[in-house]
Image (tube, helix red, strand yellow):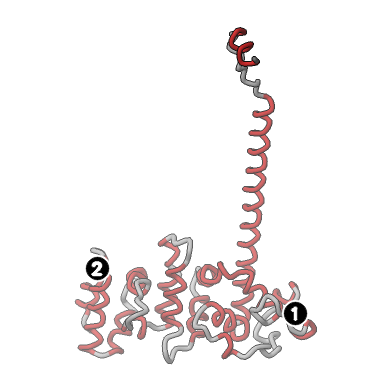
Amino acid sequence: MNLPALVEAQHLIQVGDIAGAEHALATLAETEGDQALVAALDEFPAKDLLAIIREYDASKESLVNLLVTPEQFAQAVVLEKRYADLTHEQLRGMINSVIFREGADAAEFLYEIAEVEGGYDAIADYLQDRTQMVEHFYRYATFDLYEYGDDNKTQAIDDDLLSLTRDTETRASAIDRASVEDHDWMEVTYLLRYELPEIFREVLMKLRARYQVYLRNLQNDEFAETVASEESEDEDVGAPKKNNDDGDDDNDEESAL
């Protein structure tokens, strides 16, 4: 194995040359074969692998993204939180570019992510902006907020979630997977719900908890604004009116005339 290629890639990452680091790894694959790169990535630090993968460019193929295994990717993706990207845009793009690559088993990638410490949180971060849609899909097996389907067949109740497992999840999907193959959050939600129900259960519980915190913070902010507004009004009412009388009665009389 060409270990100098790994050393070079790590050095380039440290100096901020991510493209150069990826090129060093790609050169290893070109000279010794794809499997040599796959084996080398087992020894490559997860944080450095993440630095390369998160700089994906949808306009061109990345050899690392094409060859990284589910286990290697899972170890790297859970470290994304270190970048403190509150929008999670990089996380979503990175996950989509890898798990939906041609020939990949997206469910296998999601399973491996969940197996790593922090994996459930990473998946929850990926879906956080779609919490209400994920909840709706769980309850009604559709992403259409205006379509509730056959309540007797599709509507779920809260108690169902706690007992949701592969053994208990026997109901067939109410929609065709082809209709949600967007290589994005809808397809991820579908795969979790019907192929990885235990993982879906844990992720949805995290999303619910986060949403409750969001609502409480929103209420607190609104309350604080209301109090501040009322205090401002009270100060205006209690303030003495400005006296415009300059004491010049003669001028006042002339103005009156």
Circle 2 SS class: loop
Residue lying at 23% horizontally and 84% vertically, measured from the top left: 28
Name which of mark 1 and mark 2 comes first in the sequence.
Answer: 2
**Apparent side of residue 212 relative to residue 11 in the rendered image (left or right):** right
**Apparent side of residue 94 relative to residue 52 in the rendered image (left or right):** right
| Residue carrying label 2 | 17
Residue lying at 63% horizontally and 38% vertically, measured from the top left: 228
Does residue 163 appear in the picture of this structure?
Answer: no
Residue lying at 59% horizontally and 86% vertically, measured from the top left: 195
Residue lying at 73% horizontally and 79% vertically, measured from the top left: 148
Q: Dot 1 surroundings within 10 Å: few (below 14), some, or many (20 or more)?
A: some
> Where 216 falls versus 16 (above or below)?
above
Residue type marked 1? Gln
| Residue carrying label 1 | 155
Q: Quadrant of the N terminus?
A: bottom left
Q: Dot 2 surroundings within 10 Å: few (below 14), some, or many (20 or more)?
A: some
Disc 1 to disc 2, C-alpha distance: 51 Å
Does residue 85 appear in the picture of this structure?
Answer: yes
User: Horizontal and vertical percent for residue 218?
Assistant: 63, 53
User: Horizontal and vertical percent for residue 122?
Assistant: 50, 70
User: Horizontal and vertical percent for residue 235?
Assistant: 65, 28
